[in-house]
Amino acid sequence: MQFRVRDDGASVHVALEGQLNFAANEDFQVLLGQLASHKNKKVVFDMTGLSHIDSVGLGLLYIAREDMAEGGASIVLAHPRDNVLRMLQLTEAHKTFEIQR
């Protein structure tokens, strides 16, 4: 998994690319470290470039949600495609996350 972070002042945009799975754990922890300084902002995870997510990847998003909530930030999952969208639907992630298509 690769990521790019852009702060536009009001919100933080994180472009995710590749696969969000067990192999992405270390990179995702680095990302969470970078996001820790963005308190009280909306964090938008742009999933356009994400080709796959599994249960571990979903768990990483839930961890991010908890970590960000402690700092007053909220998370939006934007533009999930194909398999990623199906996984979010199957796991009813919309009950926990705001999902923008």
Image: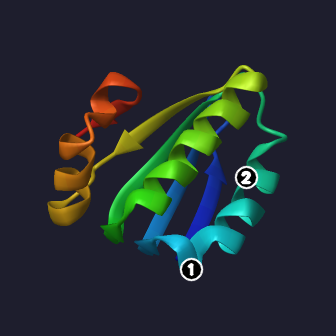
| Residue 51 % position (x, y) | 30, 73
**Disc 1 on helix, strand or loop?**
helix
Report crowding for label 1: few under 14, some 14 to 19, many 20 or more residues within 10 A (C-alpha).
few
Specify whether 35 is left or right of 96: right
Q: Which residue is mark 2?
A: 32
Q: Amino acid at mark 2?
A: Leu
Between disc 2 and disc 1, whose residue precedes? 1
| Residue 91 % position (x, y) | 27, 41
Relative vertical location of residue 10 with respect to residue 63 in this rendering, above or below = above
Quadrant in the rendering for residue 101: top left
| Residue 76 % position (x, y) | 44, 35
Q: Amino acid at mark 1?
A: Ala
Front in this rendered view, residue 58 or 3: 58
Quadrant in the rendering for residue 14: bottom right
Task: Say if residue 67 shows up in the picture.
Answer: yes
Q: Which residue is mark 1?
A: 23
For marks 2 and 1, give the one nearer the viewer: 1
Task: Say if residue 2 shows up in the picture.
Answer: no
Front in this rendered view, residue 85 or 37: 85
Residue lying at 58% horizontally and 74% vertically, measured from the top left? 24
Residue lying at 47% horizontally and 70% vertically, measured from the top left? 21
